[in-house]
Image (cartoon, rainbow, N blue to C red):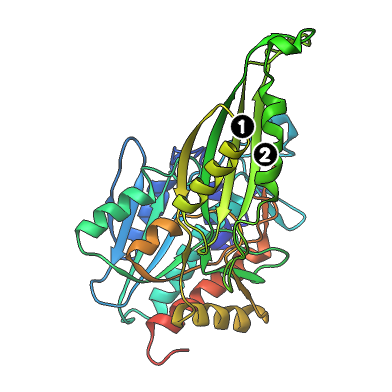
Amino acid sequence: MPADLTLPVQTLASQLLACESVTPAEGGCMPIVSERLQGMGFDCRYINRNGVSNLWARRGHTSPLFVFAGHVDVVPPGPLEQWVSPPFSPQVRDGYLYGRGAADMKSSIAAFICGLEVFLAEQPNYDGSMALLITSDEEADAVDGTAAVIEVLKTEGVRFDYCLIGEPTAVDVLGDNIKNGRRGSLSGTLHVKGIQGHIAYPHLARNPVLEASPALVELANTKWDEGNESFPPTSWQVSNINAGTGATNVIPGEMKVMFNFRFSTSSTVQGLQERTTAILQKHKLNYEITWSDGGQPFLSPRGELVDAACGAIKQELALDSDVTTSGGTSDGRFICQICDQLVEIGPVNATSHKINECVRVDDLQLLQKVYLNLMRRLLTSPSV
């Protein structure tokens, strides 16, 4: 069933979902967004880099500056034959809107824009300024997206008072979880070197899989930190192991292990690297390791923004939200460099990146109400 044109937020969400914006492509989303924003008096500016499309749209020049941040790029849809309906042909079934990006996070962009239209109609002389930062490079390398925009804004002396990111944060029902920070991400690729040989003559070879296994077990069982009141303890996980030639009678000459830390503010990149190296050396491995820093942990202290977000959800959804730092990374790790207070609120995360990704149609309208309520609380005097 196609979109219901009597529901503006569903209509806009469907327009965005129809765009094939597999990362880092914007797929036609940016013109749709910029046209709506220009119609509301926003000055739209593109800060593009290396083929990535980034939109910075601002209305007003006074403080406080309230920014909505989001991304229009999506992960690849995967096997098309496993989708009940085509991933870029949005359809409504049984009260859910289906399409790649429905949860992560085109619905949030639609809900904010539609909420913003209502807000400006009722509060044309609101306090402060509004802006949107929309990128097409969040799901992949995230090098030329929000990070690039923040670099430019830093040089221009721009600073955000509040930032709302529309990442899907809910677990079971809309509003049950919001985030005011994220753990850091540190990845490594470990190459363990052995000596290839015939499997019938193991004394003439060295098997890197067997040599490295005790070290991997120790890394997995290590308590890296205790976490703290805002973050769970740091975790270490293997994401991929590869060794061998494919033959059953050959001892491999090397093994590659890909792993990742999700770490709290109780640990540092340098400390995690040093402790990892010490364990590998303890087991006398012949190895090389390369590191990739995916982002530092960040935390927005509980203050006016988080309190307003919890109040908006309580008023619109009759829920008490859990304020957490769980989950993966987000573009908040870049935004926090020039932002005083940051919070993430979005749809239920259960189907993000999955086949048949979807969002409840009713949640689209409820999310719009939450965003509208939050704008009223922060940008009108006295607060509603």
Q: Callout 2, which amino acid?
A: Leu
Location of residue 8 (image quadrant): bottom right
Count residues near mark 1 (Cα–Cα under 10 Å), then give few for <14, some for 14-19, many for 20+. Answer: some
The earlier-in-sequence mark between 2 and 1 is 2
Q: How many marks?
A: 2
Q: Is residue 12 above or below residue 125?
A: above
Residues under labels 2 and 1: Cα distance? Answer: 9 Å
The circle drawn on residue 257 is 1
Picture coordinates of residue 362 (x, y %)?
67, 65
Residue 350 spot, x, y in % from top left = 70, 55
Mark closer to the observer (2, 1): 2
Residue at 65% across / 25% down in the picture? 242
* Front residue of this view, candidates 11 and 106: 106
Residue 356 visible in this rendered orientation of the protein:
no
Viewer-side residue, 200 vs 293: 200
Q: Nearer the viewer, residue 360 or 78?
A: 78
Q: Quadrant of residue 163?
A: bottom left
- Tag 1: residue type? Val
Q: State which quadrant residue 263 falls in.
A: bottom right
Compared with residue 315, is residue 198 higher up or lower down, i.e. above or below? above
Mark 1 lies on a secondary structure that is strand
Q: Which residue is mark 2?
A: 216
